[in-house]
Amino acid sequence: FFNRPTEPCFMNKGEDNAAFELPDHYYPDKYKTVSSALANRFGTDASVTIPVRNIALPNLDLPMQLPYNEQFSLFVAKHRKMAGKLIDVFMSMRDVDDLLSLCSYCQLRINPYMFNYCLSVAILHRPDTKGIQVPPVVETFPDKFVDPKVFRRAREVTSVVPAGARMPITIPTNYTAADSEPEQRVAYFREDIGINLHHWHWHLVYPFEAERSIVAKDRRGELFYYMHQQIIARYNVERMCNNLGRVTRFNDFRQPIAEGYFPKLDSQVASRSWPPRFANTTLRDLDRPVDQIRIDVSELDTWRERFIQAIENGFIVLPNGRQIPLDENTGIDELGNLMESSVISRNRAYYGDLHNMGHVFISYAHDPDHRHLEQYGVMGDSATAMRDPVFYRWHAYIDDIFVLHKDKLQPYQDNVLDFPGIRVSSISVEGGAGANTLGSHWQQSLAELSRGLDFTPRGSVLARFTHLHHDDFNYVIEVNNTSGQARMGTFRIFLAPTQDERGSPLGFNDQRRLMIELDKFSEGLRPGNNTIRRRSTDSSVTIPFERTFRAQSARPGDPGSADAAEFDFCGCGWPHHMLIPKGTQQGYPVVLYVMVSNWEDDRIEQDLVGSCNDAASYCGLRDRKYPDRRAMGFPFDRRASANNLSDFLRPNMAVRECRIRFTDAVQQQQQ
Ligand code: CUO
């Protein structure tokens, strides 16, 4: 179902060489006249024909209201209600055979974007489909990630050159704006395929509209806050490396948005170009009956005021008038759920839908009343939103509201920060680009596009694209345990710039908001001296390179594919190639920070067997609790009275000044 999304599922679907044999009434009208010949027509190349069970079909009226050739956005309430219904239907199928039958019926009728999304969510959450791969959306819908010129070339190549003899197609970089646009300096970050895949995957793992049991994951509101806070921190550091100021939050909804964005993407399903947003566009009241959206910009102000009031009061109000305190443990989680907002928001009627509607207002600013029959811009889709500079302005604004709450909390006291008996004498970096120097460069990698090329001749079509990467390195941490007994420590590693945009040293409260998490792990500490060596590739933030970009030989279904590990939950994770900011050719000064906290105070008792735990920091763990009892972002999530980082340091922490040196050269894909 994930291959060639608009091709009928009864056609032989390429590499699996399988074709479905459907009950007669499953064929939609457009294929009815040929239905008897269909199995023969499309099944001839198939090595296996799968008979589809004839089931009593559930009511699909709601999800079928979305036209087949339309865009689909989770941020549009009408769309997500339809999707919520379809997810529930997929979840309620008795077994996999029934699900397969229903899917074969739906695939021919339901909007392909919505179908793909809902099926992905169902596969991630049904007990009987765990371990089934959901291919990365860049393979299924490459149109959301790459310049449409690539598809034209792909069609040429597939029509003329037999599979096996095809050269990779090069995806241009830096094609959305000229150098005269300063924002273009960070386009490599905004338009990175791995970053956009991570964001899409995160929202797939944490859907905000579906049955409660799917939405109500452990600390989900807090993770919404933290994961997006880290995106902003990372983006800001990336900007500072490129001589740009930190992103200005979009907090005045009446002011024009200075940044324009012309995505240069085409929707293959909707056969439309994604609309641009011109520089200095202003948000306008929306009245789009077709999307059942009618809302004034002033509504955002109302919701904002209610948030600020809740934070000032220290409690939120429930529909029945009861108050729930925003305390230091669960306050951020409650706020995150209200803010997103998800179906587990405590009071959607009152606190509204601030974050999602921001996406909606921005993405319809070019056609607020649908008079030009235009669809939403890239901000309307979690797979494309991070391409647009305004994404970061919007999320910086959202983050600032969370920070209002965090700033009301007591700074962490010694008893929380200290780990008596544990002294970290140093942290340093080995490998990389020299002593305490991290090295970055461009790299070219290959992505497979053929799954997303409907109605084209079969066989692999590879695209070659260029992205940032860095040299592998190790952290070396020297820890002295004077407690006289074996202890277990949680190592928390962060990195931040040391200077602001003007070259002045960053004060603690500015620097802590630029702290990007690089890794978190636990390690036993023997009495005496311990040297901990940790590889950068083991980061708890990132997923391995091969999982973001599968090499040509490692696709699911390929016999012997070493990469047959689940892609589902495990597909969530910051792309490893973006672990380290780009730096500069002169060497951008950063500070590496490590804290060792007492694992006894951090740990969560749970069995981790079978969970994907290589990117838990930003993605959590499937069916498990978030594997750290501390607040996300600890110890930098709260203010402190320290003037600078050195003031903040305790014996169980250490820092190292480093540089990130960028080499402006392209390396080929790692093998
Ligand atoms: Cu991830 Cu606004 O939540 O995009």
Image (spheres, rainbow, N blue to C red):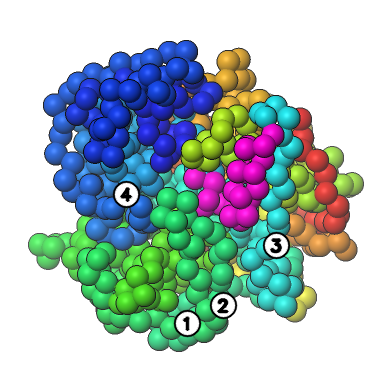
Question: Could you give the CA–CA distance between mark 3 and mark 2, rounded to whole angstroms?
Answer: 17 Å
x%, y% of residue 5?
43, 39
Please report the residue visible at 37 percent of the width from the left and 30 percent of the height from the top. Answer: 9
What is the magenta range? 141-161
Please report the residue visible at 51 percent of the width from the left and 58 percent of the height from the top. Answer: 266
Q: Which mark is residue 68?
A: 4
Residue that label 3 marks: 174
Question: Could you give the CA–CA distance between mark 4 and mark 1, rounded to whole angstroms?
Answer: 30 Å
User: Which one is earlier in the sequence, the residue at label 3 or at label 2?
Assistant: 3
| Mark 2 vs 1: CB contact within 8 A | no
Q: Quadrant of residue 647?
A: bottom right
Amino acid at dot 4: Tyr
Q: Is residue 306 above or below residue 149?
A: below
Q: Residues within 10 Å of mark 2 (few under 14, many from 20)?
A: some
Question: Could you give the CA–CA distance between mark 3 and mark 4, rounded to whole angstroms?
Answer: 32 Å
Question: Could you give the CA–CA distance between mark 4 and mark 2, rounded to whole angstroms?
Answer: 32 Å
Residue that label 1 marks: 281
Residue that label 2 marks: 259
x%, y% of residue 18?
44, 19
User: Which one is earlier in the sequence, the residue at label 3 or at label 1?
Assistant: 3
User: Which one is earlier in the sequence, the residue at label 4 or at label 1?
Assistant: 4
Q: Quadrant of residue 49?
A: top left
Which element is circle 2 on? loop
Amino acid at dot 2: Glu
Mark 1 C-beta closer than 8 Å to ligand 1 = no
